[in-house]
Image (cartoon, helix red, strand yellow):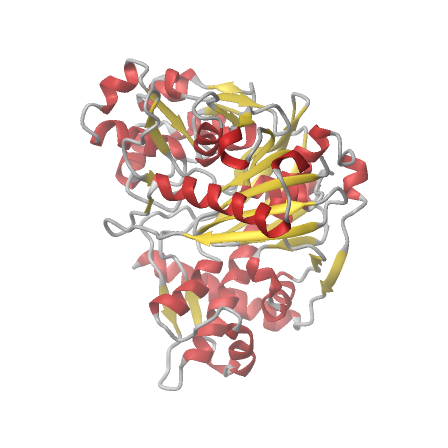
Amino acid sequence: MSHILAIDQGTTSSRAILFDEALKIVAVSQEEFPQHYPESGWVEHECSDLWTTTAATCRGVMEKAGVRATDIAGIGITNQRETTLVWDRKTGKPIHNAIVWQDRRTSAFCHELKDAGHEPTVTEKTGLLLDPYFSATKVAWILDHVEGARARAEAGELAFGTVDSWLIWNLTEGHTHVTDATNAARTMLYDIRKGRWSSTMCEMLGIPMSMLPEVKDCAADFGMARADLFGAEIPILGVAGDQQAATIGQACFSPGMLKSTYGTGCFALLNTGEELVTSQNRLLSTIAYQLDGKRTYALEGSIFIAGAVVQWLRDGLRIIRDAKETQAMAEAADASQGLVLVPAFTGLGAPYWNAECRGAVFGLTRNSGPQEFARAALESVGYQTRDLLEAMHADWSGAGEAALRVDGGMSASDWAMQFLADITGAPVDRPQVLETTAMGAAWLAGQRAGIYPDMAGFAETWALERQFDPAMEDAAREEKYAAWKRAVAAAQAF
């Protein structure tokens, strides 16, 4: 058994990637699925879409590579975090669509809890802030808005899970209701200091603890994928939320190491080791990974819109047909126009945490066109990343001056990564393997199966493809960043 099957279940698509015994990619299979927007600020997925596309891509990648289930030593799962599912324990049928991490429907409820003085307790227990982003208020919403759901939950008939739990439930035909510490840490129901579900948080939100999955290490025995799916049973041996999996895949194992992933959103994680750092700048304290019962913590900054701003250029404005076009357009844009785009389509994430803010464009002229919009879109990701890095350095002296390791789809853009280095004034390291999220999940499962090296051995395999060094003058950098800060302030004021 020389292969590992990595499942990477994301916000807009599901992917399966096969890795060989040398942790090299053998084959990839991917399927997109539709997003549903029932009301402004609401985002949902069909629960069945998450499962069927995952199962189909797993079978597809095995067929593409000519690999049988008996060749696979284990499955590693990484997933979009915070997205919330509730289903019937007996039938396995969801009682509502999955409510996606981007969804803002519980904003008013979060404000009520803040006004009642609950946010300090939330931060103390969970490391998080009171925001619709996290799973807990989404669960409460489902219990309050689906007829009979609360009574059924209190009777022990309903199960809650993030996407990893839902996939494992289906892979094991309902035999296993589990999650890992990194996904649990994103629910706003988990005490990250004590490493267990918080009765305080569950009581605050009216969520029966009987709904919650068992929490395991990131590398553990999560159950067996049933034989009828792939031709033989395959053990599920690794699970981590997507941003933590990317942190692992980037080998950010030492305190002070920093990675930023550019997918639908952007997520920067700073390894703080055994120290749980409480942010004074509205960053999140979270679990980076948990191995052999030992928790490693991180500071995290979450940006809701990164790659999604390029999708908006394509699907909303229809000024591009492919994301790759943005690089040439940004290069050809009139830089003197100074367009600033604040992509707060679903609110602003860290360090602002403004759920009501919406997107805005500043500096428009008659000459502003598709090229300037493309440039402003790419620049917005760099500005938001600088917001996060400045907050991290203010929060923790151990942040140091380590290079930023990047991954995710947008990191393939040389222009975007050069601007990121320019606006942050720090080097940006892009690895040879950009599939760091799937690689992190694969390594967790592979080292559990005994076919991959330990943490130190894995870290030695990390290889640099290109370093982007700052080339912008200090005065220009600060002038552009000041314009961004003014734009954010104006968008929030509106």
Which x, y percent locates residue 283?
52, 41
Q: To which quarter of the image does residue 464 belong?
A: bottom right
Q: Quadrant of the N terminus?
A: top right
**Would residue 486 be seen by someone viewing this image from the given angle?**
no
Q: In this rendered view, identify the residue nearer to me: 293 or 27.
A: 27
Q: In the displayed structure, does residue 112 sit left or right of residue 275?
A: left
Q: In this rendering, would 425 be left or right of 105?
A: right
Image quarter where the C terminus lies is bottom left
Compared to 346, does 288 lie above or below?
above
Residue 122 on image: x %, y %: 43, 28
Q: Position of residue 380 (x, y in %)?
A: 49, 64
User: In the image, what residue occupies the spot 55% across and 24% down?
Assistant: 223
Q: Residue at x 66, y 47 (%)?
A: 258
Q: Quadrant of residue 163 in the image?
A: top left
Q: Nearer the viewer, residue 20 or 280?
A: 20
Query: Looking at the image, can residue 30 be seen?
Result: yes
Residue found at the very far top of the displayed protein: 155
Q: Residue at x 60, y 41 (%)?
A: 6
Question: Would you place residue 274 above or below residue 151 in this image?
Answer: below
Instruction: State the count of labels.
Output: 0
Q: Residue furthest bottom?
A: 367
The extreme left residue here reads 147
Residue in front for this viewpoint, 135 or 37: 37
Position of residue 429 measured from the top left corner of the image (x, y, whole percent): 71, 58
Q: Is residue 320 left or right of residue 87?
A: right
Residue 204 vs residue 362, the one in the foreground: 204
